[in-house]
Image (tube, grey):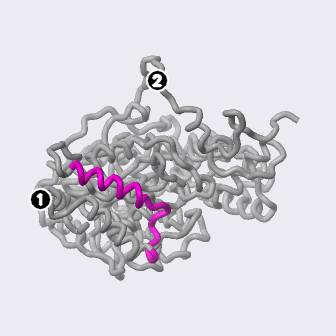
Amino acid sequence: MFEKSIGEIHSLLQNKQLSVSELVQASYDRISHVEEKVKAFVTLNEEGAKETARKLDEKLGTDAARGLLFGLPVGVKDNIVTKGLRTTCSSKILENYDPVHNATVVERLRNAETVTIGKLNMDEFAMGSSNENSGFFKTRNPWNTEHVPGGSSGGSAASVAAGEVFFSLGSDTGGSVRQPAAFCGVVGLKPTYGLVSRYGLVAFASSLDQIGPISKTVEDNAFLLQSIAGHDNLDSTSANVDIPDYLSQLTGDVKGLKIAVPKEYIGEGVEEGVREKVMEALKQLEKLGATWEEVSLPHSKYAVATYYLLASSEASANLARFDGVRYGYRADDAENLIEMYKKSRSEGFGDEVKRRIMLGTFALSSGYYDAYYKKAQQVRTLIKQDFDKVFEDYDVVIGPTAPTTAFKIGEKIDDPLTMYVNDILTIPINLAGVPAISVPCGLSNGLPVGLQIIGKHFDEGKVFRVAHAFEQATDHHKARPEL
Amino acid sequence: MARITKEQVKHVAHLARLSFNEDEIETFTEQLDNIISFAEQLNELDTTGVEPTTHVIDVKNVLREDETWESLSREETLKNAPDQENGQVKVPSIIE
């Protein structure tokens, strides 16, 4: 059922050949069949989803206007708050957190009339690239369950790849939508910073975080972005821009398009199988009438260090709110307030979260601020200028999403730096605030490779157009894992 | 040469309201030292006169009219609090 397009599903619903309840049941049937292997969900919303489905089915019999995503089963990353539906950030510190409000994106999904199937597993507080940092359990890659699904939105990508939901929402601070999308062979977009409201997204690094859609096709992705994008009074960093009609951009036409390929993105450190697939994709785009040239983004190699200083600094401030007072875990044997803070936080947070809070606190502490935090902010300017310069002459920048395919569970978890460096091709995009999508471009040793298409600020339309043209000219998006 | 000492890690842990045992202090000292050494590659770049980026898109102050509107009820506000008494959040003693 989830192989059909949104248009096809909507005509089946219109013609009474299908009900929303059946769609939702299909989701839970698939979950009961494959979830034991994939382990994508932290919390299921079965009762709530079935009630929503019944209401939508009642509406189906009337002339009332229907939402853009009417009846479609969606999964939501567990750092996006859902009223009355437990939201944990895959952390023990929020294990029993029951939100009293909805994130703006959740409200918008409600307006679009989707059905929330459940909350998806992630690296704790979105800190990680493999889902191995979840405080609860590890999600597995549907293509090979001995491999990681990527992270931090690993559950969001794996659930779509496994056919458990029609599409999902993730969040991307340094690659957390695109890298798992690449590893799981699905489509994932990180929108321009400010395009999608962050209200109700539990903050990790506020100047980098963006919520983004994950789906099987570019068209589904555009539908989902259309429904969640746009200005929000509740997020002071939300951009007040007009939202174009993304679907009308999916023309298949890339004639005359100028593509830049950064030599830093296809050089040393990028696996041969990945490079091969990306070069084939560029040939395909050439056949469709686009041209490409090699360029340089000279400050790329400094992006990982810049990112870890800035993101950890912001995280150390954002995560100060988890103190065992108003919500979350509290250690019960403390003698005074300071001890209560320390015990609750030390028992509630996992190692990676503590490591980043420590790094960030250090970088912001007296005597080190200029040397680390301010320096990183200055290098961020240089990285952003690299992109500004390339976009003067080119429409989009293209490269791989990740330097490798999905690695094995346990392979990189013992060395934080090895894990961090895996994000080298996605991090610069967050630092520059530009949009980028990952689309499947083939398999290497049986595991999916992601093609990353990067655009100018607020040029999601063009990013979608290129991704869609490539997708429609190839069959990569039709490949499915056997489970 | 080590860039970070165990004493510094203990000081930072206190600032961050975290506590560690000696083994953890050892591990964190080594790992933070590695990460900071890695981060020092930024010193290869001359950033004299480069403006720091705090925000990637143009933003201005966001102001609204000073109007009152309904906020969360006391019940909702306290719903997730680990300990409470008489409609207030309860914490261990602050003053000895």
Q: Label 1, on which residue?
A: A15
At 55% from the left and 63% from the top, the residue drawn is A134
Q: Is residue A51 magenta?
A: yes
Quarter of the rendering occupied by the N terminus of chain A: bottom left
Q: Secondary structure at mark 2?
A: loop
Q: Is residue A239 magenta?
A: no
Q: Residue B48 appears at what percent x and percent y?
A: 53, 38
Which of the pair B20/A284 is nearer the observer?
Answer: B20
At 48% from the left and 48% from the top, the residue drawn is A84
Q: Amino acid at mark 2?
A: Trp
Q: Amino acid at mark 1?
A: Asn
**A269 lies left or right of A125:** left
Q: Residue A272 appears at what percent x and percent y?
A: 36, 76
Q: Residue A330 appears at what percent x and percent y?
A: 70, 50
Alpha carbons under labels 1 and 2: distance apart: 44 Å
Residue A266 is at least partly visible in this image: no
Q: Secondary structure at mark 1?
A: loop
For disc 2, the chain is: B
Q: Magenta segment range?
A: A36-59
Packing grade of label 1 (10 A; few <14, some 14-19, many >=20) is few
For disc 1, the chain is: A
Q: Residue A164 appears at what percent x and percent y?
A: 35, 68
- Seen in the picture, residue A457 relative to A11 is either above or below; the reply is above
Viewer-nearest of labels 1 and 2? 1
Number of marks drawn: 2
Same chain shared by disc 1 and disc 2 = no
**A135 lies left or right of A268:** right
Which of the pair A160/A380 is nearer the observer?
Answer: A160
Q: Which mark is residue B69?
A: 2
